[in-house]
Amino acid sequence: MTTKEENFGDWYLDIVDKANLCDKRYPIKGMNVWTSYGWKIMRQIDTYIRQEFDATGHDEVCFPLLIPETEFAKEKDHIKGFDAEVYWVTHAGLDELDVRLVVRPTSETAIYPMYSLWVRSHQDLPLKAYQIVNTFRYETKQTRPFMRVREIHFFESHTCHATEEDATDQIHEDIEIMDRLAKAICLPYMLCIRTEWDKFPGAHYTVGIDTIMPNGRTLQMGSVHHYRTNFSIPYDITYEDENGEHKHVHQTTYGMSERLVGALVGVHGDDQGLVMPPGIAPFQCVIIPIFKKDNAAQVAEACMSLVNILKDAGIRVKLDDSDARPGAKYYEWEMKGVPLRLELGGRDIENGTVSFARRDTGEKGAIAVDSLVPGIRMLLDDISRNMYEKANAYQKERIVGIDSMEGLPEEGVLRFGWCGCDECGHKFEDTTGFKILGRPYRPEEFSGKCVVCGKDVTEAAYAAHTM
Ligand code: ZN
């Protein structure tokens, strides 16, 4: 097997296969089958996201997959941005359709015609809805499981607000949600306001959510967009204010996708397999019975009692009582990245303990059965903290400050001065081959010169090679 250090790309494909997260043999390139363990991980993330959005007053909805071309074409930047990567339905049975249908690449143009019917008065605002659906994009670059696919498992929220300020507050709430999600999946991330030429088609501005992968490239895990009235004008989404005046709503969206799975495989995994963050691991611990002929029944019974105690406490647990040898079980659950392995044998039963091994550090020890639940909770918390800190320290190291376009490192994220003009931005990208991620969303102290024109600047910019 290729090591992560030697070749990240090959290692990634290997791990995805060996941990059996998806099956790439489906006969459409870039459309993979979610196999059971991969889908369990995705569902854990979806569950987490649902809880967060439900708790912040969003309602889950589910819109049709197909969008009439007439609706899709209403916002001109939007259609220009997506034209080359959408799938079309042109026939129904034997009949050619009068109006072609787009298979959604994202759902603005499906949702907004309905929003224009749903929003009537200021009392209908804010309108906050989300859906978790698959979207389709005809990806022409080389596909890679979870990171670059043609059928994408996708989360999207779409909100309408009375004023631009209310919409801006929504962006703040979205970022707070991202902060909590990042802690749950132990993934540090960067927030950059994308350049004008890289923002979402139709957006006023886009905040990109990027994480730095082990090969020094960034992966965009999600994005938040402020639309102002760019969509509400063509889609005629208006409300009547307190004075009876009709006004266009201000809108935002928040999108995230199965790339979150790709990011956590890539960032946390090692040469033994996945390392799953306890917050979203399908199984937070696996119990492996260690028995001899004469105590098999006793060990099995003690294991069942452990399972019940942990399940009652809300800990996600898997008992592996298959016929495989313990060594083979260790290998499998290590590959699947289960945070905590518990072993129970005759000696543990005598001592009133359970043996454990941590996936993140390999550390081994024993917990008293009497304090099993708090003991395991403490270990899981510590694993989460350790995984986050390790990833954070690594990612910080990959950010390099530069003050000219000469002698650049081959990989990593560049931090530099940019005056902000399009001309310098394009020249920087063309000269260096790095892509500008944008300016930090959270202001950072900076003083320097634009690396292209030499003008004094007080705001940093970031650039990277992207996955
Ligand atoms: Zn400049």
Image (spheres, rainbow, N blue to C red):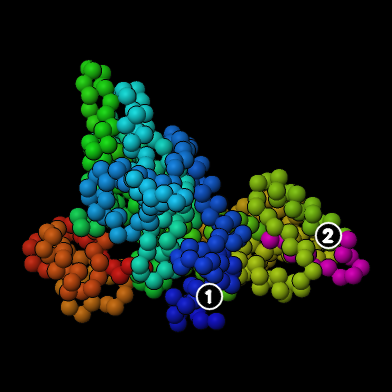
Q: Is residue 62 magenta?
A: no
The residue shown at (75%, 49%) is: 308
Quadrant in the rendering for residue 177: top left
Relative to the observer, which residue lies in front, 320 or 295?
320
Find numbered disc 1 in the image and state the secondary structure of the residue it sits on.
helix
Which residue is disc 1 drawn over?
14
Query: Camera-side residue: 107 or 200?
Result: 107
Q: In the image, is residue 165 above or below residue 193?
A: above
At label 1, the amino acid type is Asp
Using the rendered image of the protein, determine whether residue 227 is visible from the camera's viewpoint: no
Q: Residue at x 84, y 61 (%)?
A: 299
Question: Of tags 2 and 1, which is closer to the observer?
Answer: 1
What's under tag 2, amino acid-wise?
Ala
> What range is drawn magenta here?
286-297
| Secondary structure category for the residue under label 2 | helix
Check disc 1: other Cα within 10 Å, few if <14, some if 14-19, many if 20+: some
What whole-number distance in Å separates the C-alpha atoms at marks 2 and 1?
34 Å
In the displayed structure, 1 sits above or below 446; it is below
Residue 136: % across, % down: 41, 55
Q: Nearer the viewer, residue 49 or 316?
A: 49
Instruction: Determine the image quadrant of residue 34.
Output: bottom right
Question: What residue sits right under mark 2 in the picture?
Answer: 300
Image position, residue 130 (x, y; %)? 43, 41
As displayed, is residue 66 above or below residue 275?
above
The extreme right residue here reads: 294
- Locate the N terminus by quadrant: bottom right
**Residue 290 shown in magenta:** yes
Point out residue 196 in the picture as x, y percentages from the top left corner.
19, 55
Of all residues, the one furthest to the front in this rendering is 94
* Residue in the image at 32% along x and 24% along y: 120
